[in-house]
Image (cartoon, rainbow, N blue to C red):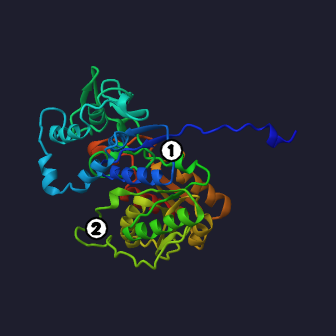
Amino acid sequence: MPISAQIRPLGRRKVGLALSGGAARGWAHIGALRALRRLGVDFDILAGCSAGALVGGCYLARKIDELEAWALALDQRKLFRYLDMNLNRGGLIRGDRLFADLRGLLGSLRIEELRMPFVAVATDLMTGHEVWLQTGDLTDVLRASSALPGLFPPVELDKRWLADGALVDPIAGLGYQKGFGGHFHNDNSIAVLRDIPGLIVACPSTGADAALMLRECVRLAREEQRVVVFLEPIALYPMRDLHADKDGLWMCRYPAVSQGVAFGEVGVYGAGKDLAIVTYGNGHYLSRQAEQALRERGVDLRIIDLRWLSPLPEAALLEAADGCRRVLIVDECRRSGNLSEALMALFVERTRIPAARIAAQDSFIATGPAYAATLPSKDDIFAAAIRSVEVS
C-alpha cells in the first residue's frame, strides 16, 4: 500500500492568536485582526496582554470599530481629560475616567459571553506569578491586564492585586527602551525568533533604514510569500542628536520612494582597517557615539550595521569586514543564545580575523534608573575597542 494511502487527514487544527502588549502601538493589532479576517484566517481562541488584551477583548465583543474610532479621535485635549492624577494609590493616574469610557463601550459584558474563548494575561503582584484571566467582567479584566506599573494602580480581582501581564510575560525584543513599560515588555532576547526556520527578522537602526527596509519587507511578503518580523528599536525614535545636544547628527531625510534596501544588504559606515564594529539596532547608535572618541585615539574603524538578523547576511557581512585587522561584535541582547554567538562562530570558521564581542549580561532588564545597568554602553564599546586594537 502506498504511503499516501496510509496517511489519514488530520482535519482542521485549532488555532490560537496571541496579541502582545505595547501601549499605544497596540492599536496596530486592530489592523492585523482586520487583515486576518480579509484573508479568511480563522482562529479558535484569542489571548492578549495589556494593549493586546484590550484590542482582543473589544474584537470579540464586536466593538472593534468603536475602539478604533476612539483611538483615532484621541487628541491632546482628550488625553488631558483622562489624566485624573493620583499620588497615593500606586500609580500616577487613577484611570477611572479612561475605564469609565471602556465600561460605557462594553457595559456589563462578561468573558463567558464572548463568541470564543478569551484569555487576558496579568501579573499577581503578591506572588509574581502569571495569571490567566478567563472568566469575569470583561472591563475589570482588561483593566487588570493593562495596569501599567507606575502609571496605573494595580487592580484587585478575586482577592489578588493584579498588574500588567508584561511584567512576567515579556515578548522577544530589544532591551533598550524608553517611556512607560518598555523595560519590562521586552525580554532582551531574540533567540526565539531566530530559531524559527524560514522566518526573516529585520531590524533598522535609523529612520531612513526603517522606511527602506519596510518597503523590502512588504515586497518579500507580497512577492515571495515570506513571513517577516520587523523588529523596531523604539528607543531610537525620538533621537535627534549623536554627540551633543542639538547637533542633529542622527536625523535623516525621508528616502525617495524609488529607493530601497535589498534583503541581505548591510550598512557600512567608514572604511577604516584597524577595526570593524559589527552591530545592529541600538548598538549601531552607541557605536557611532563611541566612534568619535576612538578616532581621536587614532583608531581607524568602520561600523557595519547588520540590518537583517535572521537569516544572517553572511556573504555581505564578510565582504564588508574584508581587509580589517580585527572585529568587535556589539550585541545589545543577552550574551547567551543571541546574535553574538552566531557572529563569533562565523568569523572564527570563515575568516582569519581575530574577533571579540560585548553583549548584555544574562539578566532581565530592571525598571527605573537601573534599566541600562546590564546593557552595553558607549563607554563599554570604547573600552572593548581599545582592548581589541591594542592586542599584539
Instruction: State which mark lies toward you, 1 or 2.
Output: 1
Vertical order, 129 against 246 (above or below)? above
Compared across the picture, whether 48 is left or right of 307 comes to: left
Residue under numbered circle 2: 240
Q: Quadrant of residue 112?
A: top left
Near-viewer residue (220 or 16): 16
**Residue at image location 28% in from the left, 62% down from the top:** 238
Q: Quadrant of residue 57?
A: top left
Vertical order, 55 against 216 (above or below)? above
* Quadrant of the image containing the C terminus: bottom right
Position of residue 218 measured from the top left corner of the image (x, y, whole percent): 49, 65
* Quadrant of the image containing the N terminus: top right
Helix, strand or loop under label 1 = loop
**Residue at image location 13% in from the left, 45% down from the top:** 83
**Residue at image location 39% in from the left, 57% down from the top:** 233
Near-viewer residue (103 or 272): 103
One can see residue 100 in this view: yes
Compared across the picture, whether 58 is left or right of 321 comes to: left
Task: Find the distance from the CA under tag 1 to the CA under tag 2.
Answer: 43 Å
Position of residue 265 measured from the top left corner of the image (x, y, whole percent): 54, 70
Name the residue type under label 2. Arg
- Which sits earlier in the primary sequence, circle 1 or circle 2? 1
Residue under numbered circle 1: 42
Q: Residue furthest top?
A: 159
Helix, strand or loop under label 2 = loop
Near-viewer residue (168 or 66): 66
- Say which mark, if any, is on residue 293: none
